[in-house]
Image: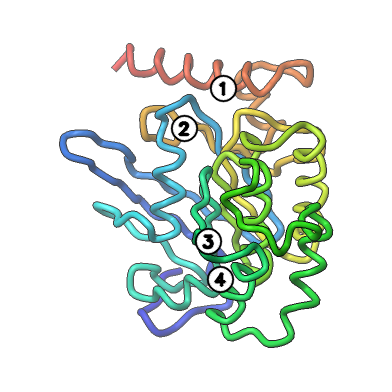
Amino acid sequence: MQTDDNQTTPDAPLLDVSGISYRYGSLNALTNATFTVEPRQLVSLVGRNGAGKSTLLKCIAGWTQVTQGEVRIHGYAIQKNERYVREHLILVPDTPQFYDELTAWEHLQFVAQAHGWRGWETDAEDLLHRYGLLSNKDAFPFTFSRGMRYKLALCMALLVEPEILLLDEPLGPLDPVSADELWIELNRHRSDGMAILFSSHQLPQEAQPDRYLIMEQGEIIADGTPDSLRADFSLDGRHSLDDLLRSAIEARKAEADHV
């Protein structure tokens, strides 16, 4: 249910993406993306390089202005309620940016102050400890490895406890052990009510997404649970995510060839 700009309704989805498109010059980078995400859902956004995954996440976060359609959080249109969005949704990009003059701890302080949080220090120390960064809290992020920088960005995002966490290729910067630890931590946040939408080509066993959104050439070509999508493409539990992605793309190509 849609609302006006200043009201929300109890039955509105947590995240409602409705027909959003993004055109860059002559390129349709995103076409009519439509789906919803509810609390505690872990949704995996998969697709080949250039499929539009990063563009979709940036449009949802309001980093990129959509050409058409709208994104709503609890019924609030993000384009007209930017402050509300910042309080409820955070995107961690695949290559986070930091201030050269601030330490890791000062970055967390900056985020806490920007959101008006008091007594943030205990939570910040706990996050740094759980992500293995506490001993580096007084170091500058430009001295960190790529994986450490991504972990710091995660700590900054989780410090403000967003209802919706968007992660762009979170596994890319992380070693296998850190990737497993990441999903253990994220599943803990998920059990507390957080919704997580992430893009990735790799899925550790701990991830266990509720749904896949499969993208190809800027379009969502499949949306469903792992079991329902395997059934749609006549696959079983032995088939990998790559097999599922390949089957979805082949089915879409066959459909286009018959048009």
Distance of label 4 from label 1 (alpha carbons):
31 Å
Residue 80 to residue 211: above or below: below
Q: Position of residue 221 (x, y in %)?
A: 46, 31
- Reading the image, the residue beneath label 3 is 15
Using the image, tell me which numbered label, if any, was put on residue 215.
2
Secondary structure of residue under mark 3: strand
Identify which amino acid the numbered label 4 is placed on.
His
The reply to whether dot 2 and dot 4 touch (C-beta < 8 Å) is no
The reply to whether dot 2 and dot 3 touch (C-beta < 8 Å) is no
Secondary structure of residue under mark 2: strand
- Reading the image, the residue beneath label 1 is 245
The quadrant in which residue 199 appears is top right
Q: Position of residue 169 (x, y in %)?
A: 57, 39
Residue 134 to residue 49: above or below: below
Residue shown at 52%/50% (left/top)?
96
Secondary structure of residue under mark 4: helix
Mark 4, mark 3: which one is toward the viewer?
Answer: 4
Identify which amino acid the numbered label 1 is placed on.
Leu
Q: Could you classify mark 2 by the number of other residues whose Cα lies within 10 Å: few (under 14), some (14-19), or many (20 or more)?
A: many
Q: Upstream in the sequence, badge 4 or badge 3?
A: 3
- Reading the image, the residue beneath label 4 is 88
Residue shown at 41%/70% (left/top)?
2
Q: Upstream in the sequence, badge 1 or badge 3?
A: 3
Q: Could you classify mark 3 by the number of other residues whose Cα lies within 10 Å: few (under 14), some (14-19), or many (20 or more)?
A: many
Distance of label 2 from label 1 (alpha carbons):
9 Å
144 and 161: which one is in front? 144
Q: Is residue 26 left or right of residue 53?
A: left
Residue shown at 82%/57% (left/top)?
188
Q: Upstream in the sequence, badge 2 or badge 4?
A: 4
Q: Could you classify mark 1 by the number of other residues whose Cα lies within 10 Å: few (under 14), some (14-19), or many (20 or more)?
A: many
Residue 171 to residue 186: above or below: above
